[in-house]
Image (cartoon, rainbow, N blue to C red):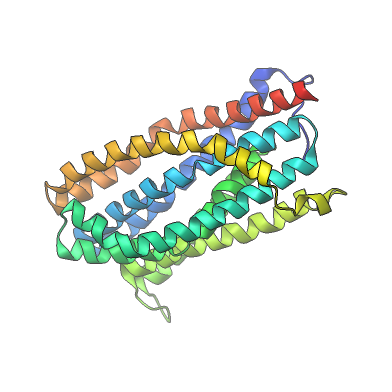
Amino acid sequence: MERLDFEGKPLTSLIIQLAWPALLENMLHTMVFFVDMLMVARLGTVAIASVGLGGAMIFVVTSIFQALSAGATATVARFVGARNYEKAGRSAINAIALSIAAGLFVALFMYFFTPIFFGFFGVSPLVKKLGTVYVRTVLFFAPFRFFLFVAGASMRGAGDTRTPMKITFVMNSFNILMNYLLIFGPGPFPRLEVFGAGIATGSSFVLGMLVYTVLLWKMILGGPWKEGVLRFDRELLSQIVKISTPTALEQLILRLGFVVFLRIVTSLGTIALAAHEIAVRIESMSFMLGIGFGTAAATLVGQGLGAELQ
């Protein structure tokens, strides 16, 4: 964990250094549910619509709580910029603990309310049934998913955007393999179809969490400040929540508009919904460049502010 070299490198070089791995990482994150949808496409239009709408529902819910990443990036970046690595590590640990708690809440909430949400969209009974299975299965792993959000955000705040990109690539590769084995059931593997897609995606979250845990353990707990890192810090948690709340509200407002539009699409029928979900996944790749540069800006501004306070 080291502060970025503001004096030894041109600002443009630092921006590109941080932005391109973040760009690829976000593309890979988007592809997780896109791959699920493509691989269940062989099961028919209903399966595409179920996984597509289920993935959209997961995206709406998780994007609100993903705002915790903003708080993690900002606090970690600022403390790394000030070379206060103990507080940077403590910020990451406290933010991760908060994200796991949020993930448990989402997993429980969505288990009970997923059928109601599918009912709101007015889809066919079969789409509702399969979609509910997919959403419940994936969001059973929500604590692991939220762990990934905040662990990656903490690393990016520390100036390392390449490691999260590499971990996400490994997760995606594992997800594709597990999808093939559990959706179609070759050889001794069970043919679980849509349920298998959910298990495969959730399993990739667990793998990612394990890799992050090992790396964060070495990065954060490998220094002489490790005793001060593993400590509950009410002030830091309050700061993380304060930074994250406006982002969460912004995402909530955006996603409500998305939900209304999606309700209009579902009224056109299963085939229209399936086509829409495929098109949206492809379209979402178009704004990944902006997200990459946004990540670079957040890290640079945070570390720059910390450096000024040093």
Between 166 and 164, the residue placed more toward the observer is: 164
Q: Position of residue 154 (x, y in %)?
A: 64, 43
Residue at horizontal 39 percent and vertical 75 percent from the top: 186
If the image is split into quadrants, where does the C terminus sit?
A: top right
In this picture, is 57 found above or below 260? Answer: below
Q: Quadrant of residue 163?
A: top right
In this rendering, position of residue 174 left or right of residue 97: left
Q: Position of residue 130 (x, y in %)?
A: 26, 65
Residue at horizontal 23 percent and vertical 57 percent from the top: 118
In this picture, is 133 found above or below 156? Answer: below
Between 292 and 99, the residue placed more toward the observer is: 99
Between 16 and 54, the residue placed more toward the observer is: 54
Residue 142 is at least partly visible in this image: no
Between 14 and 304, the residue placed more toward the observer is: 304
If the image is split into quadrants, where does the N terminus sit?
A: top right
Q: Position of residue 207 (x, y in %)?
A: 57, 62
The residue lying furthest to the bottom in this view is: 188
The residue lying furthest to the left in this view is: 268
Residue 228 is at least partly visible in this image: yes
Q: Position of residue 98 (x, y in %)?
A: 58, 52
Q: Quadrant of residue 86?
A: top right
Residue at horizontal 54 percent and vertical 57 percent from the top: 101
